[in-house]
Image: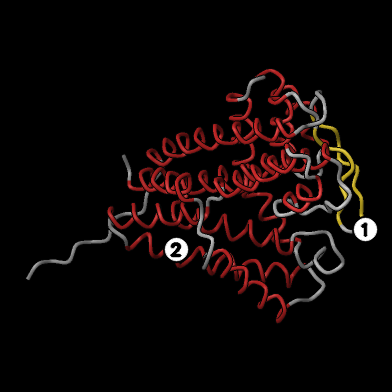
Amino acid sequence: MSARALGLLLGYAADRVWADPVRHHPVAWFGTVASRLEQRVWRDDRLAGTAYAAVLVGGVVLPAAGAERRAGPATRVVTTAAATWLVLGGTSLDREAAAVQARLEVGDLPGARAQVGRIVGRSTADLDAAGVARAAVESVAENTSDAVVGALVWGAVAGLPGLLGFRAANTLDAMVGHRTARHDRFGWAGARLDDVLGLPGARLTAALAAAAGPDHAGALRAWRRDAGAHPSPNAGPVEAAFAGALGVTLGGPTTYGDRTEDRPRLGDGAAPTAHDVTRARRLAARVGLGAAVVSALIAVRAPTPPLPPRRPRR
């Protein structure tokens, strides 16, 4: 087994056992740097935003590529495992969704609204129980792609720079990739970069959801029929496949601050319930495991940087 494949599997296992770090997380450090840089360079145009994204993502990718090229096999295993553990967020996502589910099951709607607000960007204050469950299922689906599968795919293809670059782009999209007055133009490049990098992971997530879900045909049908109507090229296939696999309907009115979007309906079933949050979590776990195996197989066959030359003995 290659050093890259072994590192990915060890990092995936570490996330399943310990989740990602709560304190002093490097992603939080990156976010702090990105926020401070935005305050200095922000202008209401795409060129400034493109330069901003290039500096931040390039500032992560280039040192990572250099470090991987200089590392020997054992060091590559350790650094790939550590980076995989740090960029994955599957177990933390599962725990947050489980907390939403627990609040719904005891009828604590205010608590469920507050809890689901930790994993979604939409307004949650006026959601009913079905709306909270729908938000949780959609978040589990989309973030399984963003926080697990996409990172593993790029780790398999591009190693350490792929892992860290994907997470940097995804973090930038979360920070500035919104269609607001401030970020519509400045965040355009970050959002488009995240869309491009998310394409393979989203398709693999949808395919694994169809393969591992209880309704294979329903997942494929919803993916083919409904995904294209979603405003996101990556969330559409993932959410549609999860909806079809679980036999529920996702989508519908979604409020962000004072703006409400009427999202397309995905799937054919009833509105999600607390039990469907459990089912989505189980499906996400199977998808994550499948992605780890597929990514390890890709990594075994992927070209790796040459080992550094040995120094001659004197």
User: Relative to 18, is 62 above or below?
Assistant: below
| Residue 64, disc | 2
Q: Residues within 10 Å of mark 1 (few under 14, many from 20)?
A: few
Furthest-front residue in this view: 106
In the picture provided, is 284 more to the left or to the right than 227?
left
Specify the amino acid type for callout 2: Ala
Q: In this rendering, which labeled residue sits more in front, label 1 or label 2? A: 1
The quarter holding residue 5 reads: top left
Residue drawn at the location 79% of the way across and 27% of the way down:
267
Which type of secondary structure does the marked residue at label 1 adopt? loop
Give the structural element (helix, strand or loop) at label 2. helix
Crowd around label 2: few <14 · some 14–19 · many ≥20 (10 Å): some
Residue 47 appears at what percent x and percent y?
74, 70
In this view, 90 is above or below 258: above
Residue at horizontal 63 percent and vertical 25 percent from the top? 210
Per the rendering, the mark at residue 258 is 1
The circle drawn on residue 39 is none
Q: Which kind of residue does numbered mark 1 sit on?
A: Asp
Q: Is residue 54 left or right of residue 48?
A: left
Q: Position of residue 226 (x, y in %)?
A: 80, 30
Say if mark 1 contacts mark 2, CB within 8 Å.
no
Asked if residue 238 lies left or right of residue 63, the reply is: right
Q: Earlier in the sequence, mark 1 or mark 2?
A: 2
- Counting labels gives 2
Residue at 17% x, 66% y is: 311
| Front in this rendered view, residue 115 or 262 | 115
**Could you say where residue 129 lies in the image, as x and y percent from the top left?**
82, 39
Front residue (pair 205, 22): 22
In the image, residue 269 sits, relative to residue 109, either above or below, namely: above
Q: Quadrant of the C terminus?
A: bottom left
Horizontal and vertical percent position of residue 283:
60, 31
